[in-house]
Amino acid sequence: MPQHFVCLTFDHDNASPMIAREMTTPTMISRGDFGMVATERLLALLGKHSIASTWFIPGHTIETYPASVASVHAAGHEIGHHGWTHRVPASLGREEEERELARGDEAVKSLTGRKARGYRSPAWDLSPHSIELLLKHGFVYDSSLMGHDYLPYQARDGDVVTLHEPIRYGADTALVEMPISWSLDDYPVFEYMRTPSVLQAGLMNADLVGANWFADFAFMAEHYDWGVLTYTFHPHVIGRGHRLIMLDGLIGKLAGAGARFVTMEQAVDEYRARYPNGRSERGR
Ligand SMILES: [Zn+2]
């Protein structure tokens, strides 16, 4: 019997990405304030559909908005690690990256009473040290890589990549990768943002985006007996009225097409039961 899982994941990072880019004017910070409004709406929507989801929350957000993040945990959603600041691991160096992991760990523990099982890197760019550090710090899974769209796999460590030689792949590790994609993320399609170097247009029609997102599930259902599709949302982005109406409809359509909504840690358990020896995306 086919099994098609869907993970609704929320990167509840509020103002922290702006602060990491040194954009700290009142209007930039207020974008994060809207994340609190949106979180209430999302918890109501998820509750209406009886869906447990996964929220990756930077320590900065946990410590700045304690009541809001407590309401997410109290509603039964999984809390994952999303850095303490929202700086990209690839920009930090090994020591600073490890400090971020440790400080974020403490923040998550203060919220939930236990360490996060999962990690998602700010802005999805792991450093060459990340996999080793995540294993050292006891993480079970990562969700920052793009090697598949429907099938989890074992994260590799130690790839050797140079300009003039073919890639020499490193070994698979015990860390489970729950892959993601910008094409399944609300941020580039919806959020209008201008930085000194980048203009992100965003503001796309929500129904058209929702049609893309449903079609990725439909393809999985047609071509795979088993799989996990992961959507990534940001409360302050997806929480606008017209987008919530679309998300409500999308959830209904997915459920009607046989989707089973699970948290990421539940999806990891399902993956391990189906692939006890792990799956590899190494050198296909
Ligand atoms: Zn983020």
Image (cartoon, rainbow, N blue to C red):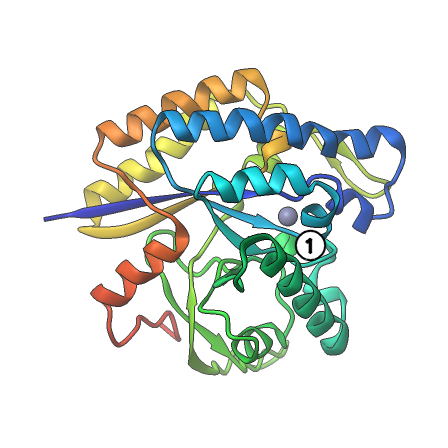
**Amino acid on which disc 1 is placed:** Gly
Q: Residue 65 in the image: state x and y as whole percent.
A: 70, 40
- Classify residue 213 as left or right of residue 183: left
Residue 226's place in the image compared with 196, above or below, is below
Q: Is residue 233 visible?
A: no
Q: Is residue 140 visible?
A: yes
Foreground pick, 61 / 279 = 61
Q: Residue 112 in the image: state x and y as whole percent.
A: 54, 54
Residue drawn 49% across and 58% down?
A: 143
From the Cβ of disc 1, is ligand 1 less than 8 Å away? Answer: no
Residue 36's place in the image compared with 111, above or below, is above
Q: Image quarter for residue 277?
A: bottom left
Residue drawn 66% across and 58% down?
A: 107
Foreground pick, 266 / 188 = 266
- Classify residue 243 as left or right of residue 17: left
Q: Which residue is mark 1?
A: 59
Residue extending farthest to the left is 1
- Classify residue 89 as left or right of residue 159: right
- Classify residue 87 as left or right of residue 142: right
Residue drawn 17% across and 51% down?
A: 225
Q: How many marks?
A: 1
Residue extending farthest to the right is 25
Residue drawn 9% across and 48% down?
A: 1
Q: Residue 280 in the image: state x and y as whole percent.
A: 34, 72
Question: On the rendered image, what quadrant is the C terminus found in?
Answer: bottom left
Q: Residue 231 in the image: state x and y as whole percent.
A: 45, 42
Residue 126's place in the image compared with 160, above or below, is above
Mark 1 closeness class: few <14, some 14–19, many ≥20 residues within 10 Å = many
Q: Secondary structure at mark 1?
A: helix
